[in-house]
Amino acid sequence: MNFKNKPILGMIHLAGDDVLKRALEEIQILEEEGVDGLIIENYHGKIEDVDLVLFHLQNFKGLLGLNILPNDYELALKLAEEYNADFIQLDYVAGTYNRTTSIDEQHFLSVRRKFLQERKDSEMEEIIILGGIHPKYYIPVTNSILKDDIEIGMKRAEAIVVTGEGTGKETPIEKIKEFRSIMGEHPLIVGAGLTPLTVQQQLSVADGAIVGSTFKPHGITTQKIQRSLVKEFMDEVKKVRNGI
């Protein structure tokens, strides 16, 4: 993944009565409007829906990734391997939170090594991990230190994802800058709430973005992606890439 080009990854929430039909229609819109890649996520759909959509994307030319909620890195890596995906997204890759336990480091590393070796054996590129730190919907336990959690996360993930309080809610620029000050040149992805109005400011600090609700009418995740919203957003991204 080339982070220098500020990749935009479109989120496919798997909503609708006919999940596959809508997903493929949304993917076509994203492709045609210049979005760099996809994340297939069981946000509204089932894990079986993720599998089904991935099966129909075996000739997809852009960046292909997936997220299996809640934070199932083992299944995500398995599906990424099966369908030759480029990356997976994890809600969190380090830190301890009130609603869950922290990642079991030894298990995580053993699973990661397994799939890394399989990719090496087949001379394929490694599956990249985009991992959140202190993300939306997760409350860090008392006495958590952001710097420490980020430094651990940077050892586990090729890019760190920063978010605000929830899906569709703006990620504060102050938080993005704080992450950047700790991370140095390690790739940083804005994971929620980016809009055409904030693209230039936030991508001047971050190295890319995950975009979902912004592409939908009124930011409602159950709605279908709207082409005009994708175009408006990507027009702003092009300005950033062209230094305008």
Image: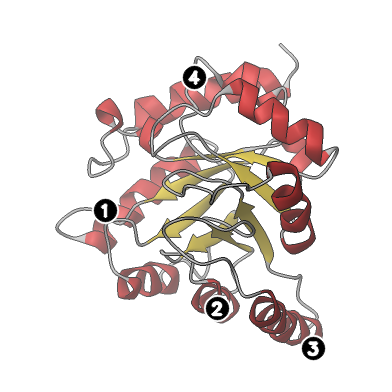
Question: Does residue 1 appear anywhere in the picture?
Answer: no
At numbered mark 4, what does the secondary structure look like: helix, strand or loop?
A: loop
Mark 2 closeness class: few <14, some 14–19, many ≥20 residues within 10 Å: some
Is 91 placed above or below 3 here? below
Amino acid type assigned to the residue bearing label 2 in the image: Glu
Q: Which residue is disc 4 drawn over?
A: 196
Is 116 placed above or below 160 here? below
Whole-number angstrom distance, CA of label 3 to CA of label 2: 19 Å
Along the polypeptide, which appears first: circle 1 or circle 4? 1
Seen at 70% across and 51% down, the residue is 149
Seen from the viewer's position, the closer of residues 139 and 34 is 139
Along the polypeptide, which appears first: circle 4 or circle 3? 3
Q: Which residue is disc 3 drawn over?
A: 121
Residue 74 — which label?
Answer: 2
Amino acid type assigned to the residue bearing label 1 in the image: Arg
Asked whether, in this view, residue 131 is left or right of residue 69, the answer is right
Whole-number angstrom distance, CA of label 1 to CA of label 4: 24 Å
Whole-number angstrom distance, CA of label 2 to CA of label 1: 27 Å
At numbered mark 2, what does the secondary structure look like: helix, strand or loop?
A: helix
At numbered mark 3, what does the secondary structure look like: helix, strand or loop?
A: helix
Q: Which residue is disc 1 drawn over?
A: 22
Seen from the viewer's position, the closer of residues 61 and 169 is 169
Q: Position of residue 136 (x, y in %)?
A: 46, 43
Asked whether, in this view, residue 87 is left or right of residue 109, the answer is left
